Amino acid sequence: MARATSRNARIGWTVAAWFVALLIFFPILYTIITSLKTEQEAIAGFDLIPSFTLESFQTVQSQNNYFRPFTNSVILAVGSTLLALIVAIPAAWAMAFSPTKRTKDILMWMLSTKMMPAVAVLVPIYLIFLWTGLMDTRIGLTILLMLINLPIVVWMLYTYFREIPGEILEAARMDGATLRDEILYVLTPMAIPGIASTLLLNIILAWNEAFWTIQLTTTNAAPLSAFIASFSSPQGLFWAKLSAASVMAIAPILVLGWFSQKQLVRGLTFGAVK
Amino acid sequence: MATRQTQGLARLMRAPAIILLFVWMIVPLCMTLYYSFLNYNLLNPGMTSWAGWFNYQYFYTDPAFFEAIWNTLVLVLGVLLITVAGGIGIAMLIDKPIWGQGVVRILVISPFFVMPPVAALIWKNMIMHPSYGVFADVARFFGASPVDWFAQYPLTSIILIVAWQWLPFATLILLTSLQSLDTEQMEAAEMDGAPAHARFLYLVLPHMARAITVVILIQTIFLLGVYAEILVTTNGGPGFASTNLTFLIYRAARLNFDIGGAAAGGIIAVVLANIIAIFLMRAVGKNLD
């Protein structure tokens, strides 16, 4: 930077930024603190120092069998993302490397399917799940989440694949590479970072999905989003327990999210802001 | 490069994704359209009959419908106002030369990764609860009486929660845009004596205009579908005070088992979403070439 910022100004901006950041983060921080309190402490008024007990975590696990929804969340998020990748990688690949006149229209149409409000198809999807016995099954919900995120997956992969220079393929061909060599040694290494980013963002989106998971599950296939929503009617002393369940539900994805800030911008704006 | 053989292969590679999405889009939508013209209640499945426009008429004349449309608008506009204005401010603050920028970014972005039911329950119980919430603690500290947020200001409370969830998204997108601003241009303006507000108005804002548009349009799509936050906090009440269109349709389908009515509401929601989608497609499409 050409001009030096004065030290005082820098201190001022730092204090202001940290204040705002902590204010925004506060509800999450306070939940983490409360999860480490006893139920009596939790409702005893504002206190930032917990007694660091893990009893709420134990109670949530033993009373509510937390591992069932947790496993469901993992299976649904990872499963639906992998399924989507299997379908989307070839499609995005073809659109990026042998585009036709209609490629752009196809991409825009795919994006437009994402604009359909979920509630508009609530009735048919609900009835189809009832008729086919898919209600409250992991397989039904996995397929549904795959379909919901498929447009974003195709789009993200397409924007990554498009950045792989075509000349590199020609160079490889001039050197006598076969199609198999091309895919294995030239394209795959260059495509893997994009595929990994797409995977990460879509696991996050699928994990946090909270409309269909609540509509289409009861107990058997209910992931954490539906499990937590069932806590909405308070019974007795439950602040610390609720906090413990919340912390367990958001911790894995919060950490994943911190690593995916860049991909988030790219994926959710469909490449419009980089 | 594109021989006939590779073109055939490319078509084969594209087909599964396109067919899947086409079926996913067209089949449920056609079913919704069909059901919207039926008298079909799951409590009385044997009494199904042709309804004509009755379901639409019923939805249109229901006072709850206009309340829900109004609430949807207030919710979307309220959240947009808070997140865009707040996002610009926070993005500019983080973009300053501060210590610990990486950590500040992480703290600010975090609410976006909290799933909606958890976000709503945290706010409902930890922050806004009339006896045990932090807001109540603060009110008592200043000698005021605590506010029962969800009973007295149900829609405002939900706007606050949803804005908290989306503020990180707006901030992150606007920050990304801000960081691509030409610093030399800013310095030149500063040397020429342009005051801070003029630099903001004539340099920063026009540069961010595109990102702001994208934030508004993408958020609108998601905000029209706000559901879990309402379900776990107010359940749409008191009365219909915090019921949006999504929640109204959910009530018709799942609580009243009124398949025909819910389908008609769904078609209305599609029409509304499409009007907004047209604008979004234009903004995003320009960037494709």
Image: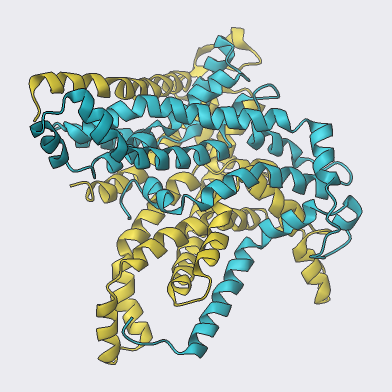
Chain colours: A cyan, B yellow
Q: In which quadrant of the rendered image does the C terminus of chain A lie?
A: bottom left
Task: Identify which residue is drawn at 63% across, 48% down.
Answer: B242
Task: Identify which residue is drawn at 44% across, 68% down.
Answer: B88
Q: In which quadrant of the rendered image does the N terminus of chain A lie?
A: bottom left
Residue A98, x across and y down, in percent:
16, 31
Count up the numbered dots.
Answer: 0
Q: Is residue A13 above or below residue B77?
A: below
Task: Identify which residue is drawn at 53% across, 71% down.
Answer: B100
- The quadrant holding residue B116 is top right
Residue B176, x across and y down, in percent:
38, 62
Residue B234, visible in the rendered structure: no
Residue A157, x across and y down, in percent:
33, 38
Viewer-side residue, B237 vs A97: A97
Q: Is residue B193 above or below residue B50?
A: below
Residue B47, x across and y down, in percent:
59, 9
Residue A268, visible in the rendered structure: yes
- The quadrant holding residue B229 is top right
